[in-house]
């Protein structure tokens, strides 16, 4: 049994997709795995409601200005208490310091809504859309000390048709994320 800790800031649709996928796979192939804990940095975020419905323990971390490492130490302590083998960033909107990245190196992954190295940063999807790229997509990658610079684990893309709205692009990106991210997490846990 391997355990996942998810860090999220918002809706948590990826968090939910991963939790449900691991739960559904538990009785089938390979060893069972689970999402053991959610850590969120926003007390009003919907991912916390999802955690409650799924019965997954959740914590809200407080970031005090200029004291990112203190928040990260608190997160690490929760993740360790939950026996976390893999930390999964799923819409976590904070930049992690080298302190946290070093502690979890090789056990820390992220999903980004663009085809990295194109359009890193907080607005990957909007930047991809505005750039007029004809291919849109997602990247799952290891996290290193940079912003969206870690080694790529998997990328998927789709062709953008001429009249595709931002909303449609967003919908397609989320669909792809919910299909690919849970599968990548499961694969990494099975290694
Ligand atoms: C996803 O689009 C992900 O690529 C980005 O943040 C978004 C999170 O969405 N990093 P959700 O909270 O999982 O619904």
Image: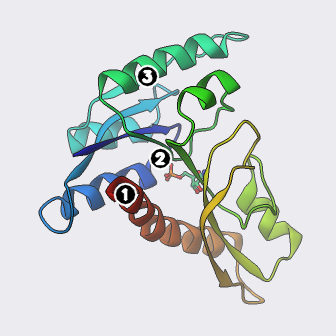
- Badge 1 crowding class, 10 Å Cα cut-off, few under 14, some 14 to 19, many 20 or more, is few
Q: Which mark is residue 149?
A: none
State the SS at label 1.
loop
Q: CA distance from mark 3 to mark 2?
A: 14 Å
Task: Identify the residue position indicated by label 2 in the image.
Answer: 11
Task: Identify the residue position indicated by label 3 in the image.
Answer: 60
14 lies above or below 25: above
Measured from the top left, where is residue 125 in percent x and y? Answer: 71, 61
Q: CA distance from mark 3 to mark 1?
A: 30 Å
Quadrant housing residue 113: bottom right
State the SS at label 2.
loop
- Disc 2 residue lies near ligand 1 with CB under 8 A: yes
Quadrant housing residue 129: bottom right
Q: Which of the two discs, 3 and 1, sits closer to the camera?
A: 1
Dot placed on the residue nearer the N-terminal end, 3 or 2: 2
Marks counted in the figure total: 3
Observer-nearest of 14 and 77: 77
Horizontal side, residue 27 vs residue 24: left or right? left
Q: CA distance from mark 2 to mark 1?
A: 29 Å
Task: Identify the residue position indicated by label 1 in the image.
Answer: 191
148 lies above or below 187: above
- Badge 3 crowding class, 10 Å Cα cut-off, few under 14, some 14 to 19, many 20 or more, is some
Dot placed on the residue nearer the N-terminal end, 2 or 1: 2
Measured from the top left, where is residue 78 in percent x and y? Answer: 38, 21
Observer-nearest of 78 and 173: 78
Quadrant where the image shows the C terminus: bottom left
Coloring scheme used: rainbow
Residue ID at (51%, 28%):
42
Horizontal side, residue 20 vs residue 26: left or right? right
Dot placed on the residue nearer the N-terminal end, 3 or 1: 3
> Which residue in the rendered view is the most extreme toward the right?
131
């Amino acid at each position: 049994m391997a355990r996942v800790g998810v860090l999220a800031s918002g809706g948590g649709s990826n968090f939910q997709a991963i939790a449900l996928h691991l739960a559904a796979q538990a009785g089938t192939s390979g060893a069972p795995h689970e999402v053991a804990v959610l850590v969120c940095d926003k007390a009003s975020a919907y991912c916390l409601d999802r955690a409650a419905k799924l019965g997954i323990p959740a914590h809200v971390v407080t970031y005090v200005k200029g004291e990112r490492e203190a928040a990260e130490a608190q997160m690490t302590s929760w993740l360790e208490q939950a026996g976390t083998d893999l930390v999964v960033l799923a819409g976590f909107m904070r930049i992690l310091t080298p302190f946290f990245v070093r502690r979890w190196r090789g056990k820390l992954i992220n999903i980004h809504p663009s085809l990295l190295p194109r359009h890193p940063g907080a607005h990957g999807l909007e930047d991809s859309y505005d750039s007029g790229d004809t291919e849109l997509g997602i990247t799952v990658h290891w996290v290193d000390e940079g912003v969206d610079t870690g080694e790529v684990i998997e990328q998927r893309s789709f062709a953008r048709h001429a009249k595709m709205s931002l909303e449609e692009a967003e919908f397609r990106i989320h669909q792809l994320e919910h299909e690919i991210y849970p599968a990548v997490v499961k694969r990494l846990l099975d290694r």
